[in-house]
Amino acid sequence: MATRSIWRGVALAVAAIGLALAVSSIRTTGESSTRDARVADGHPNLNGIWQASNTANWDLLPHAVHPAVSQPGVYANHPVLAAPVVALGAVGLVPPGPGVVEGDEIPYTPDAAARKKENGERWLDRDPEVRCYMPGIPRAMYMPYPFQITQSANKIQMVFAYANASRTIFLEEAPLPPADKWMGHSVGHWEGNTLVVHVTNFNDRTWLSRAGDFHSDALDVVERLTPVTPDALRYEVTLTDPNVYTRPWKMSMVLYRQLEENATLMDFRCLEFVEETFLGHLRKNQLVKHWEGDTIVLDVTRRVPEGDKKYER
Amino acid sequence: MKSAPRFLPIAILVGAVTIVVSAQTSKAPRTSWGAPDLQGIWNTNTFLPLERAAKFGTRPTMTEEEHAQELAGLQERNKRPGRDSRDVAGKPGVGTEKDVARAYNEFWFGDKPTKLSYSTSMVIDPADGRIPAFTPDAAQRIAAKKEFLAALLQGTSGGRPGSISPRRGDPSPDYNLDRINRADGPEDRGGPERCFGNGVPVVMGTGTFGGVMQLVQSTDSVSLYYDIGQGSGFAYVIPITKRPHLPKNIQLYRGDAIGHWEGDTFVADVTNFSDETDFHGARENLHLVMRFKRVDAHTLSVQFTVDDPTTWTKSWTAVQELERADEKTTLVLEPGCHEGNYGLMGMLINTRAAEKAFREGTGPNPATQDNATGGGDN
């Protein structure tokens, strides 16, 4: 615990320095940015294409590299790649990451902790991302795909490459949605250089990561987006959900602006590709030959490349 | 709706400068950075057909007298009973295969248009207000698809007489987006049933299901969101950039849009369409130019020119004037078609079950049943 509080102190200090840098640096046009640091109404310029550069979508907590789908190996604590990703080799691994959660702990209630564990074990069956569903907030913000911000005076529109999901952040009063939403209902305001967004009216269908982190429809999210440089945003999220968490908790990360001259938001159009995964067993003439009822039996056939064989003497 | 705690003051706008347009003036407003302001929630309740009725010839507008007559006709059409009570082949349609295939009854279609435009068509070029003729190749391609659709219906209550067609096992001659009388796999179902979503350009309809469009703009991009087509809404960003279009081999469902300003008009040039889209017969070779112009405080003109030498003998242009909706009362809803698409799964499950019943001698041959007509106007 002592170590943790030291780190928290360090983190706070870093955040304070970051804030100081933010305030000073965005007064001028950044050398690396192709845009003005501020828009006409004086707020920081968030226009452009942004993307997280972390592994939060795989797992919000610190994690070492491990198989995306695993089976027991020779050693109990060293699982190996399993079907359906065994043929993918290194591409079937979860990239490691130091985590984005303050205090490295998500305060699940005991029941919720059990469900999170089960979700993680049955990830492929349960993760809405596997089904190409709208990812919800905050997950959409840190998926490993870009999103584009169009910033106006009374609305900020965000369009995400993944699944063509989108959200409108209302800076003025807006009618509440008549039903819960996958992407929630976002109402924002500026506090100095920080865009503060309160997101409510969620359904209980979205997740926070591939590790099975979830929430209920009582989820309440407060996001804070603060420029650290003209091309980087500190993104802080506080999640409150008394049905699932014992207290509000917070994640923090940086979102980066794409500076490529040909930066383009291209639709990550996945819906027709997941038809085979979820409806393949209902075809008259099945493409995957190893369906047993509604179960895909993965019999992975992959020939060891010729070149590798010469070492197998 | 749940009762989430709302501990932040809602809708505080700090330091933002917006141009206030008084209700009295009808001048086109500008943004705080001086660009024509295209923003708002837009829809239309003014009926205007895409193509012109032949009786108007080359006249783009109608007279007062004609307008009164057309409006009376529209009001008369609005009184007609809905789909669920329409006749099939001169007999009451209730309970027929066609009736079942219609799927939605009048309740789902909501309000009908009450206003009528003085324009005679959205198409303004060519002069006759009609979509130009197909090229011979396109006509052949479209006829081949129609013949395939007819073959799959052959011998059913909704199709031409004959025995079950040997073509029932054939692949579709194009990437199928139609409602065809087969459900061997998801690709046999139409684009809407697979939640493919509306394509561009969007020609908005009138009434409850006409759709609404929300437009947000910055110095950097114009971001559209179309809430349209029973949960098939979509987001569409038009970046203001000087980059060239993507390489020709990259096909995107809604194309590659690049925007720029020409005076007070925002122009989007869109290429790189996909063979999974169909705009009145044009597919991957479509070249679309959209022009957005704020005409006055209440009106946004959306003009589009479509060009595809592999489909039409010449390019054509249409214009639709959208009306500004009240932002306090107009809801723009997220799509959710794919997330709630149990229908597609149901179509496949039903068909497999019907095939099984036929094999076991407890049901008719599904190939003799009509599960395709009844959509749209047929």
Image (tube, rainbow, N blue to C red):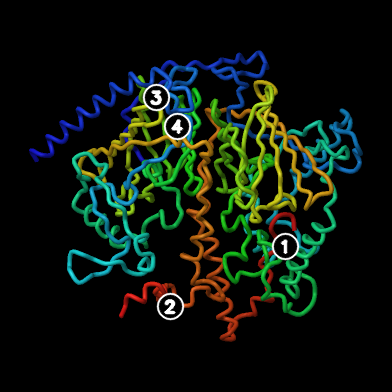
Chain of the residue displaying label 4: A
Q: Nearer the viewer, residue B8 or A298?
A: A298
Residue under label 3, please give it. Answer: A189
Residue under label 4, please give it. Answer: A169
Dot 4 amino acid type: Ile
Q: Between disc 3 and disc 2, whose residue precedes?
A: 3
CA distance separating discs 4 and 2: 46 Å
Dot 2 amino acid type: Glu
Q: Callout 1: helix, strand or loop?
A: loop
Chain of the residue displaying label 2: A
CA distance separating discs 4 and 1: 47 Å
Chain of the residue displaying label 1: B
- Closer to the eye: label 3 or 1: 3
Dot 1 amino acid type: Gly
At label 4, counting other C-alpha atoms closer than 10 Å, the crowd grade (few under 14, some 14-19, many 20 or more) is: many
Looking at the picture, how far across and down is residue A276, in whole percent? 50, 66
- Closer to the eye: label 2 or 1: 2
Say whether marks 3 and 1 touch (CB < 8 Å): no
Looking at the picture, how far across and down is residue A225, in whole percent? 36, 30
Where's the C terminus of chain A, which quadrant?
Answer: bottom left
Residue B168 is left or right of residue A189, and the answer is: right
Residue under label 1, please give it. Answer: B93
Report whether mark 3 lies on the same chain as mark 2: yes
Residue A217 is left or right of residue B141, and the answer is: left
Dot 3 amino acid type: His
Residue A101 is left or right of residue B256, and the answer is: left
* Residue under the point 39% across and 24% down: A189
Q: Between disc 4 and disc 2, whose residue precedes?
A: 4
Residue under label 2, please give it. Answer: A292
Looking at the picture, how far across and down is residue B359, in whole percent? 58, 84
